[in-house]
Amino acid sequence: MGMLSLLKRWLPLVIVLVVFTLYLVAIQPHLNSYTSDEIWYVSAARNFINEVGLGRYLVSYGVTVAPSPPCNVTGATPAIYYKDNLMAWYSNVTYTQLKSLMDNSTCIVRFGYYYPDKQSIVTYLNIEHPWFGKCFMVLSMLLLGDKPVTWRVPSMILSALMLILVYYIALYISNNVAYASLASLALLMDASFRDVGIIALLDVYIGFFTLLTVYLYVTKRFTSSSVAAGLAAASKYPGVFTVFAGAYLEAYRRNGLWALVYLAISLIVFIIPQLPIIHLVGGLSNYISDVFFYLKWFTESRPPGPVASNPFDWLIGVDSFVNNVSPPLYAMGLPGAYLVALVYSFLMIIPQSRKLLFSNIQFNEYSIPVTILTMWLGFWMIYLLGNTTLYSYYTMDFAPLIPLELVLAMHRAKPNTKPWIIIAALAGIAYGIAVQWSMIYSLIKAIT
């Protein structure tokens, strides 16, 4: 392949990546503190660093002591004092000043950036979610420092990789640069991707490892896909839906035994990143008890607060979760395109409609519609079990698959249905961009 051909093949992806990078550079200075649920995940990562004796690497970013009083740093004045929760954060102290507190078993000393003003936050480990995603935050904070932009570096890198993977998978399926370009552009215009993908939330890790699972399955690396699925589940529990999708496909591709092998590999991969936390909570028995407690908690509604939505709302952009007000970050997804992609997913797995509308779909390509449906229906299951306070940022878990489903449908459509399949896909994307136009305008205005 000549240089000109390579340029034509990959230039659209380069342009999308440049635009995304410029967006990151422009918006991060405006997100100079905790954003949304970073208060929980980042705090848990910092507590882990301190619990395992690595807090000294964060000393230049300050120190929090609790309870304060009586645990006050001699000869220093706190930069922040949390009156209700009896904590104090000092921006500049020495080990000598802290020695007496660190030797006092009744005092808690935490090195690093200041904490959010939440009860018991200095001992919180976020056990209600698996720990693999937070491991990225731990490494980033240790290597790059404990400040907002560094918490988000792993999220931003994985988001860029998602743009690359979506483009590559679309190109692999269709061998059509126009389709691949449309897929990466649609993902870039997905408000959940732009919203969640730039901050330190766990759903970006599910989104990436779910996409990686699909990539490996589509490219016929089936066993490797079970490892990626296990990592999705190890990042946050909704990643279990990714595992179930892969096991379902393996049951059809081979047999039930191989589905169990797929599940077993994913389970082993899931457990490995939890081992340090199992140790910190006092052993396997305590960990299992915590897991079952929080699994029950996931089927219960949360107290009134953030805007909640149901999985159908996500398809049309209703009641979107607000991660940040200024600049505005709304996890709206790409409504319309979600709805069309979901319909195409159903049509592909129902034999009668598939025979009528599509041809030559390869079995490995079913990973895309099956994973979308498993995740969306999985959230409906949680909703129907009693947790009616779901949030639209969960769409990040399957957002990268939406453009791929549209590309798969357009590429595999029969000649007599292809024009209508393409028109519906383009209409869905156009609708998604149109309904968030005012939000995009406000976002651009806020960061410029």
Image (cartoon, rainbow, N blue to C red):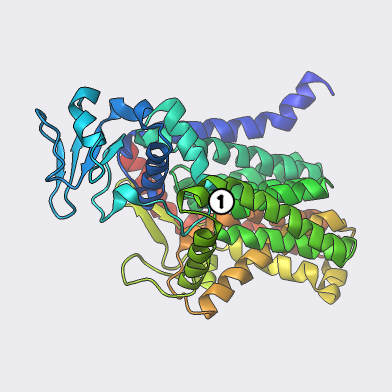
Q: Residue at x 15, y 55 (%)?
A: 84
Q: Is residue 336 left or right of residue 200?
A: right
In the depicted view, which residue is nearer to us: 197 or 63?
A: 63
Residue type at the position of mark 1: Ser
Q: Is residue 47 left or right of residue 426?
A: left
Quadrant assignment, res 347: bottom right
Residue 328 seen in the current view? no
For the C terminus, the image quarter is top left
- In the rendered image, residue 216, in percent from the top left (x then y), is placed at 77, 46
For the N terminus, the image quarter is top right
Residue 130 seen in the current view? yes
Question: How many tags in the picture?
Answer: 1
Q: Is residue 264 left or right of residue 394?
A: right
Relative to 71, does residue 296 appear above or below in the rendering? below
Check disc 1 and report its element: helix, strand or loop.
helix
Quadrant assignment, res 421: bottom right
Q: Residues within 10 Å of mark 1 (few under 14, many from 20)?
A: many
- In the rendered image, residue 197, in percent from the top left (x then y), is placed at 49, 45
Q: Residue at x 59, y 52 (%)?
A: 234
Q: Residue at x 49, y 33 (%)?
A: 139
Q: Residue at x 77, y 19 (%)?
A: 3
Relative to 442, does residue 322 appear above or below in the rendering? below
- In the rendered image, residue 227, in percent from the top left (x then y), is placed at 72, 48
In the depicted view, which residue is nearer to us: 342 or 214?
A: 214
Per the image, the residue denoted by label 1 is: 235
Relative to 58, does residue 162 appear above or below in the rendering? below
- In the rendered image, residue 80, in percent from the top left (x then y), is placed at 16, 40
